[in-house]
Amino acid sequence: MSEPGAPGERPDGNEPRYPYPQQPHQHGYHYPQWQPPGSPKKTSPAAVVLIVGSVVVVILMLLAFLAWGYPGFLRESDAKSAIGTWSEPSATALSPTPATTASAPVTLPGGGRAPMPKRTKPLADPVTCAFPPASGSPAPKKVAPPPDGPAPSSGSVGVRLATSAGDIGLTLDRALAPCTVVNFLSLAKQDFYDGTSCHRLSVTAGLQMLQCGDPVGDGTGGPGYTISDEVFPELTYGRGVLAMAKTAEPDSGGSQFFLVYGDVSISPEYTVFGSIDDAGLGVLDSVARGGIDPARPGIGDGSGPPKIPVTFTHVTTP
């Protein structure tokens, strides 16, 4: 799922020449002689009107503030968050404000699932995959990357996620993202996902999904290597879609993925590599209705850990 030295220090470690602010010289300073005060000036009518008007404006602003809350320019932005990991956690990311939408009613989409996206031009079969090491700190959970080399770009694979909230069936589509399918199966067969929990639920319109796959549990973790994006312009992210999360950088995916149970309106930058079965969508609906846990920190965009925990006990693969 990045400290400068103390004030007054020099880079070479020596004492600064002027460790404190220099005071102005007071030698030879002469204070002005005291003069008897003159008679006070009368306040003009225009000044009186201006003062009274200012007081009235301040009172009206105070009443408006009490009635309607913060003015618009002070309110938190309603912009939707992109789906990704934190490649370099900051102090804000480590101690964010708990989500404020946890108690809000969750509106789930009615009907069935959205149509799966399809490539207008099929991929070569096979394709060549590579899984280079990720830069930064070591992986929090040791795992071997898949071997570089060819991967089939046709056919599908059934996978079942056994979770604390219920089973979620997946169908991985090699025609959409063959290297991503190879990666997911490799991680599952090494029990990488066992014991991990889905760390981010979003119930906001335009970003209704559950994000999982981080061994750290806060959006900063990965497998220690990256996979290339397998995207195309026609990608969409409707109900029932399974897709990879990543950072803001291209080709930065690893182990985190998201399960779409509602409406997700984002640009086609996230690899879609499969679909969710009806029983799995029912599990996701129940988790979404439970909302976000206000007792646990979110990431400051209205999303956060689900109140109903979703912990993977095992991933069954062919």
Image: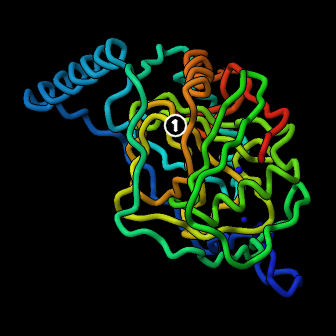
Where residue 188 appears, as percent x and y from the top left, is 80, 49
For the residue pair 14 and 216, the one nearer the viewer reads as: 216
Outermost residue toward the bottom?
Answer: 12
Outermost residue toward the right?
Answer: 142
Q: Is residue 38 left or right of residue 159?
A: left
Identity of the residue drawn at 69% across and 70% down = 21
Q: Mark 1 sits on what residue?
A: 260
Judge whether residue 19 can be spotted in this image.
Answer: no
Identity of the residue drawn at 77% across and 35% down = 197
Give the mark count: 1
Quarter holding residue 196: top right
For the residue pair 203 and 239, the one nearer the viewer reads as: 239
Its colouring scheme is rainbow
Say what amino acid the circle numbered 1 marks.
Val
Outermost residue toward the front?
Answer: 155
Where residue 19 appears, as percent x and y from the top left, is 79, 74
For the residue pair 139 and 170, the one nearer the viewer reads as: 170
Judge whether residue 116 can be spotted in this image.
Answer: yes
Where residue 189 appears, as percent x and y from the top left, is 84, 52
Element carrying mark 1: strand
Quarter holding residue 24: bottom right
Q: Is residue 235 left or right of residue 170?
A: left
Q: Is 41 located above or below residue 184 in the figure?
A: above
Q: Is 228 located above or below residue 166 in the figure?
A: below
Where residue 121 appears, as percent x and y from the top left, is 37, 69
Identity of the residue drawn at 73% across and 43% down = 218
Identity of the residue drawn at 63% across and 32% down = 304
Q: Is residue 102 left or right of residue 199?
A: left
For the residue pair 241 and 34, the one nearer the viewer reads as: 241
Outermost residue toward the left?
Answer: 45
Q: Residues within 10 Å of mark 1 (few under 14, many from 20)?
A: many
